[in-house]
Image (spheres, rainbow, N blue to C red):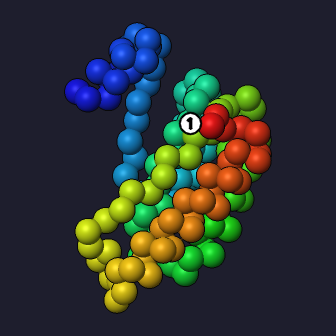
Amino acid sequence: MYCWTLLRELGFLERQVTVQWFGFQWPGLFDRLMEKASSEEHPHVLVLHAGGNDMEVMSQMDPVRLMKLDVDKICLLFPGVMVVWSEMVPRLVWRWAQDHSAMERSRIKLNKLLSAFVRRSGVGGD
């Protein structure tokens, strides 16, 4: 599995790391983390790679506002966690988009806003 190869290259042992994918839109993220918080050990590092699917169904500022609120709540839920924003990647096709170029501009802007917010929050590494 690529993930474990990468973790070994970074010096981690498999028993030191738990990797989980949830595969849903952003509005379900915090609820899922709440479930995990009550039953599992709190994470030391939380990599957020989400939001691309939300861009297709929400206006640009809605996901930004929601994501910022949730990052703040995550920091309260998991004190000391390092939150890492993993940028949304370009897509060849945005399923419901009428203007591909506009979606790409929005994706780039959203990535910049969230990356800067996580860095300013003092919870993420550069």
**Amino acid type of the residue tagged 1 in the rendering:** Leu
Name the quadrant containing residue 35.
Answer: top right
The residue positioned farthest toward the bottom in the image shown: 98
Q: Quadrant of residue 41?
A: top right
Residue named by callout 1: 46
Neighbor class of circle 1 (other Cα within 10 Å; few <14, some 14-19, many 20+) is some
Relative side of 55 to 9, left or right: right
Q: Residue at x 39, y 57 (%)?
A: 89
Q: Quadrant of residue 18?
A: top left
Q: Position of residue 16 (x, y in %)?
A: 47, 13
Q: Would residue 87 appear left or right of 79 to someone viewing this image?
A: left
Task: Say which residue appears at 63% left-offset and 75% top-offset.
Answer: 61
11 or 47, which is in the foreground? Answer: 11
What is the quadrant of the C terminus in the image? top right
Up-down: is 82 above or below 5?
below
Q: Position of residue 85 (x, y in %)?
A: 56, 46
Q: Nearer the viewer, residue 107 or 4?
A: 107
What kind of element bears circle 1? strand
Figure quadrant of the N terminus: top left
Residue 28 visible somewhere in the drawing: no
Q: Residue at x 63, y 67 (%)?
A: 64
Question: Where is residue 119 shown, x and y percent of the image?
Answer: 70, 45
